[in-house]
Amino acid sequence: MADGSVTPGVLRRMLAGGSPEAQTRRATATGLLKRAVVLAAQDAVGLVVTPRQAREDRASLDDLVEKLPEHALLSILEQDGEPRGLAVLDAQSLAALIEVQTTGRVVPREAPGRVPTRTDALLAAGFLDRLLSTFHDLMREAELDTADMLDNVCHGYCVKDARAVGMALPESDFFLLDLDLDYGDGAKTG
């Protein structure tokens, strides 16, 4: 290598940010969720998603319910048939998923706020299941201690409002992962 050449394996590691071991050590739940969203959106519905910001937090059930956005699709996540968590798609995220599946593109304007329908839930279900599966796989690969939280977790059913979330989920502290995303090359953000 005195001539300045770089072997393909070394080049791949440099482009990927280091060795697989170093990447695993740096893996975080939010970082893996960002990657999972990009992969799941592309695979499930052909949607281009760009993660912008990610936040981790913990909240009680009451605090979780209080933070829910208006006009969001609220999907109860089940683990072995029991309600264990919640996936939230705000109005813009839901609109992007629906638009790309029904028209083939994301409309570059803000979607009006409206109560999500059963049809909306059906159109979002494939993406949510792919997201959960991909996120779980990435967490397992990274050997994160929290990966077992996602064992057998799937999209269960949607509820109408924050009150129904409070009734469906167990009284517990919840680990929150919140992402800001651009859809369709910036056509929508959510």
Image (spheres, rainbow, N blue to C red):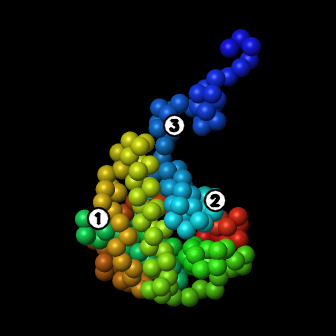
Whole-percent x, y for residue 125 in the image: 44, 73
Name the amino acid type tagged 3: Gln
Task: Kindly identify the residue that appears in the image at 44 percent across and 86 percent down.
Answer: 118
Q: Position of residue 2 (x, y in %)?
A: 71, 11
Question: Residue 6: which quarter of the image?
Answer: top right
Q: Nearer the viewer, residue 57 or 85?
A: 85
Residue 82: percent from left, percent from top? 25, 70
Q: Pointer 3: what residue?
A: 23
Tell whether label 1 touches label 2 (CB within 8 Å): no
- Residue 50, disc: 2
Above/below status of 44 relative to 137:
below
Q: Is residue 45 left or right of residue 187?
A: left
Q: Amino acid at mark 1?
A: Gln
Element under disc 1: strand
Say whether disc 2 or disc 1 marks the residue closer to the N-terminus: 2
Look at 71% across and 66% down and name the residue there: 186
Q: How crowded is the residue under tag 2: few (<14 C-alpha within 10 Å), some, or many (20+)?
A: some
Question: Could you give the CA–CA distance between mark 2 and mark 3, rounded to whole angstroms?
Answer: 20 Å
Can residue 103 be seen in the rendering of this structure?
A: yes
Looking at marks 3 and 1 on the same chain, the residue that comes earlier in the sequence is marked by 3
| Nearer to us in this view, 162 or 27 | 27
Name the residue that disc number 1 marks: 79
Is disc 3 placed on a helix, strand or loop? helix
Between the C-alphas of marks 3 and 1, the distance is 29 Å
Q: Residues within 10 Å of mark 1 (few under 14, many from 20)?
A: some
